[in-house]
Amino acid sequence: QVQVVESGGGLVQAGGSLRLSCVASGSRFSYNIMNWYRQAPGKQRELVARISKDSSTTYADSAKGRFTISRDNAKNTVYLQMNSLKPEDTAVYYCNAVGPDIRGTLRNSWGQGTQVTVSS
């Protein structure tokens, strides 16, 4: 079983920055695709950023140029650096790990989410 734990959310003014962290324990982390999703009230969960096993990255249009996803395989951790935050970035941010656990079983694991609130 893979445990995914996010941290780093909070309240920030528009234009500010936050860095989210996510630790995926119990995984063969370097073989996992790591995703950040978000869900705002009344809206569907949406993909914000993805980092693949080879560290190639994908971003939602809303995140391009402002957010950066990165990974540290030695720490089983993925980060989401969010700059120039806007009120519309307010959401619960979820980390998602897709790939093998330490036994090699493929998993699709989610964290509990961390709240990001951007005030205008």
Image (cartoon, helix red, strand yellow):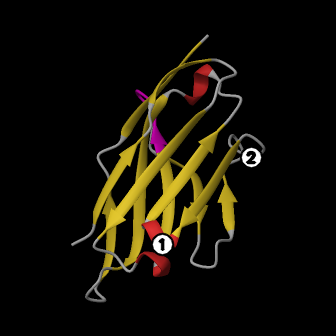
- Seen as rendered, the residue at the extreme right is 65
In the image, which residues are magenta?
A: 38-43
Tell me which corner region of the image, top left, top right, bottom left or bottom right, holds residue 66.
top right
Q: Earlier in the sequence, mark 2 or mark 1?
A: 2
Compared across the picture, whether 74 is left or right of 109 comes to: right
Give residue 52's position: percent from left, percent from top.
59, 72
Residue behind mark 2 = 64
Vertical relation: 69 (above or below) 101: above
Residue 114 is a magenta residue? no
Q: Amino acid at mark 2?
A: Lys
Vertical relation: 46 (above or below) 101: above
The N terminus sits in image quarter: bottom left
Inter-mark Cα distance, 2 to 1: 26 Å
Label 2 crowd bin: few (<14), some (14–19), many (20+), radius 10 Å: few
Residue behind mark 1 = 74
Give residue 82's position: percent from left, percent from top.
63, 38
- Seen as rendered, the residue at the extreme bottom is 104
Question: Circle 2 sits in a helix, a strand or a loop, which is it?
Answer: loop
Which residue appears at 63% of the width and 79% of the height? 54
Residue 42 is a magenta residue? yes
